Amino acid sequence: MSNEPMLMLMQAAPAGQSGGTAAALIQFFPFIAIFVIFYLLVMRPQQRRVKEHRDSVSAVKKGDEVVTGGGHIGKVTKVGDDEVEVEFAAGQRHRVVKSTLSDVRRPAGSKPAND
C-alpha cells in the first residue's frame, strides 16, 4: 500500500477552515477603511459645496451681482424659472441660463431670498 492517497486527502482538506471568514474580513479591512476616509475627506465636502452652490443659484434675485461660467460679472435685472437677465454694462443686457452661473454675490447687508 502506498501513502499517496492519504497525502492527497490531507492536502485537499486543511484542518483550520473555520477562521476563513474572519481572515477575509481582516484582508478587506484596509480597503473599507480607505473608502471611509475617502468619503469623509473628499466626497462629503464636495457634495456639501454642490448643494450650497445649487441653493445660492436657485435663490438669486433682482439686484444680485453674479459671475457667469465664462467669467463675466453683471447685475441681475430680471429672474425667471430657468433664466436670469443680467446687465453687464449700461444698456447691455443678456439672458443667461441659471445653471451656468458660477457665483452669486449679494450686496452688503442683504439677506438671501429664502430667509
Image (cartoon, grey):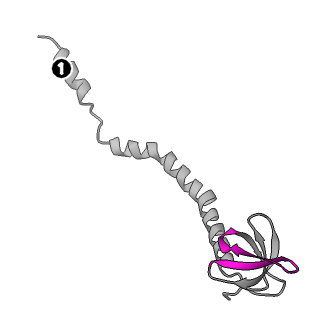
Q: Where does the C terminus fall, quadrant-wise?
A: bottom right
Quarter of the rendering containing residue 112: bottom right
Under tag 1, what secondary structure?
A: helix
Question: How many marks overall?
Answer: 1
Residue occupying the far left of the picture: 1
- For the point 80% across and 65% down, the residue is 71
Q: Amino acid at mark 1?
A: Met
User: What are the residue bounds of the magenta stretch?
Assistant: 82-100
Residue occupying the far top of the picture: 1
Categorize mark 1 by other alpha carbons within 10 Å: few (<14), some (14-19), many (20+). few
- For the point 39% across and 42% down, the residue is 23
Q: Main secondary structure of the magenta part?
A: strand
Please say whether residue 89 is one of the residues in the magenta stretch: yes
**Residue 27 position in % (x across, y down):** 45, 42
Please say whether residue 111 is one of the residues in the magenta stretch: no
Q: Where does the N terminus fall, quadrant-wise?
A: top left
**Residue 3 position in % (x across, y down):** 17, 14
Please determine whether, in this image, residue 6 is positioned above or below residue 86: above
Please determine whether, in this image, residue 65 is positioned above or below residue 28: below
- The residue where tag 1 is placed is 6
- For the point 23% across and 30% down, the residue is 13
Residue 92 or 7: which is nearer the viewer? Answer: 92
- For the point 19% across and 15% down, the residue is 4
Please determine whether, in this image, residue 64 is positioned above or below residue 25: below
